[in-house]
């Protein structure tokens, strides 16, 4: 039965629940969005409706429900997964290999955690919880993913979807150095080059004395090397795109550069071209076996291993860079350490940070400094010079 009241009606239904309704300013009858379990709940709903009418903020319950539905749809349209993929699609300034790296970070690390969360609901606590969930696992992958997350959220700030980025993990995009790089002396570098397969001797000296990245070196064509002037013109680098290796422009403008070669590298290249001549000026200087871009795995070769055939065990010796580094007593040497070697030898030869920045193709002086290492040999020289000054003063 309906209760008598000044505003609205409350009726108890056969189900023992309560229905509330009222006549609105539009002279239409409006029912509550649902039936209520208690009369008190029905009274509360009517009171809220009357308050909206008195404040001049009333609209029909149906209109408000539609507005809430549209707002929820708009909220869900800003979920991290969709926004992040749209951000990646808009990044026309990155190389295919970089795009693939960003995509992997989204697919394997960020979307599984933040996928359906609206951008403006992700908090700094959410980001910290995600970051901490890795513990000590995959620190490099986590750092890369955090850098992508930071870039996505920076775009959200620019788009005025959020006021401030929630990415505030200190040094979250950095990884601790898992190993200290090894820096070779000049003698060790030449020993390494001599221990390499003949077709890779000049490549090794070029990496250790000129500081070329692996991708830059293997993408060199005959036209990129001027033996008379003794310079290398770097305009391309090997990159991985869609599962295959291709050559493309350097990652940054600083990567486009001309590098002077020591005479030892020029001489090694002359011998290389005499023994492994190239047909055209566009032919690769250091091709793989099939004539395409040399792969990392082909350069490294394989470590020592055993194979079983016909019930017998055959030992296969290492070859390539794997063998060469063992022969010079540097079993943990990485090919990229040769770039650090070049930076350190250049600094020892008197090059300034700015000069090494240009030579190595770095965008910032900080990276050039990072690649310069103080070797034990150089440290001993410094100590000896200090002692000579002490002796002179005494």
Image: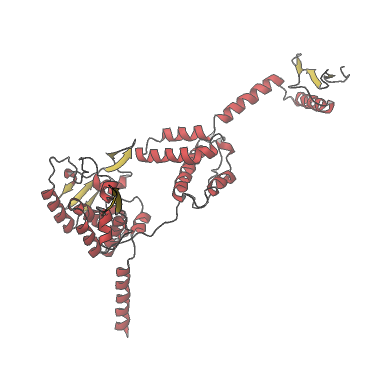
Residue 228 visible in the picture: no
Q: Residue at x 29, y 59 (%)?
A: 341
Is the residue 240 above or below the residue 26 in the image?
below
Q: Is residue 373 rendered to the left or right of residue 52?
A: left
Q: Position of residue 28 (x, y in %)?
A: 75, 13
Q: Residue at x 35, y 37 (%)?
A: 96
Q: Considering depth in this image, is 261 or 108 the residue closer to the camera? A: 108
Q: Residue at x 83, y 28 (%)?
A: 40
Q: Considering depth in this image, is 163 or 90 the residue closer to the camera? A: 90
Total numbered badges shown on the rendered structure: 0
Residue at the far right in the pictured view: 4
Residue at the far front in the pictured view: 311
Q: Position of residue 88 (x, y in %)?
A: 43, 35
* Residue 70 location, quadrant: top right
Residue 145 visible in the picture: yes
* Residue 260 location, quadrant: bottom left
Quadrant assignment for the C terminus: bottom left
Q: Residue at x 67, y 20 (%)?
A: 63
Q: Is residue 127 rendered to the left or right of residue 388?
A: right
Quadrant assignment for the N terminus: top right
The colour style of the image is secondary structure
Q: Position of residue 203 (x, y in %)?
A: 21, 52
Q: Position of residue 249 (x, y in %)?
A: 29, 41
Residue at the far bottom in the pictured view: 394
Is the residue 383 above or below the residue 119 in the image?
below
Q: Is residue 262 rendered to the left or right of residue 158?
A: left
Is the residue 108 above or below the residue 19 in the image?
below
């Amino acid at each position: 039965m309906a209760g008598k009241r000044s505003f609205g009606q409350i009726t108890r239904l056969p189900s023992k629940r309560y229905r509330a309704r009222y006549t609105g300013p539009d002279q239409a009858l409006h029912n509550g969005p649902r039936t209520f379990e208690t009369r008190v709940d029905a009274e509360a709903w009517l009171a809220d409706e009357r308050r909206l009418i008195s404040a001049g903020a009333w609209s029909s319950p149906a209109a408000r429900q539609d507005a809430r539905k549209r707002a929820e749809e708009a909220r869900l349209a800003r979920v991290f997964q969709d926004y992040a993929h749209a951000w990646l699609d808009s990044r026309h300034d990155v190389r295919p290999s970089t795009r693939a790296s960003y995509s992997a970070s989204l697919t394997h690390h960020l979307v599984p955690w933040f996928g359906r969360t609206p951008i403006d609901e992700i908090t700094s606590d959410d980001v910290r919880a995600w970051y901490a969930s890795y513990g000590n696992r995959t620190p490099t992958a986590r750092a890369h993913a955090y850098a992508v997350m930071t870039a996505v959220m920076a775009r959200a700030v620019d788009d005025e979807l959020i006021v401030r980025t929630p990415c505030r993990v200190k040094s979250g995009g950095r990884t601790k150095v898992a190993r200290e790089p090894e820096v070779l002396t000049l003698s060790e570098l030449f020993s390494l080059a001599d221990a390499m397969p003949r077709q890779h001797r000049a490549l090794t000296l070029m990496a250790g004395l000129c500081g070329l990245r692996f991708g830059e070196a293997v993408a060199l064509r005959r036209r990129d090397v001027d033996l008379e002037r003794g310079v290398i013109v770097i305009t391309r680098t090997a990159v991985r795109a869609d599962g295959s290796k291709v050559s493309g422009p350097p990652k940054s403008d600083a990567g486009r550069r001309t590098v002077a070669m020591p005479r030892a590298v020029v001489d090694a290249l002359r011998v290389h071209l005499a023994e492994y001549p190239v047909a055209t000026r566009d032919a690769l200087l250091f091709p793989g076996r099939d004539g395409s871009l040399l792969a990392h795995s082909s350069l490294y070769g394989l470590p020592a291993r055993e194979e079983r055939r016909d019930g017998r065990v055959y030992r296969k010796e290492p070859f390539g860079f794997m063998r060469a580094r063992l022969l010079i007593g540097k079993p943990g040497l990485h090919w990229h350490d040769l770039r650090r070697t070049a930076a350190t030898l250049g600094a020892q030869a008197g090059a300034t940070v700015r000069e090494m920045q240009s030579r190595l193709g770095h965008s910032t002086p900080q990276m050039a400094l990072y690649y310069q290492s103080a070797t034990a040999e150089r440290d001993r020289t410094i100590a000896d010079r200090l002692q000579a000054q002490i002796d002179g003063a005494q």
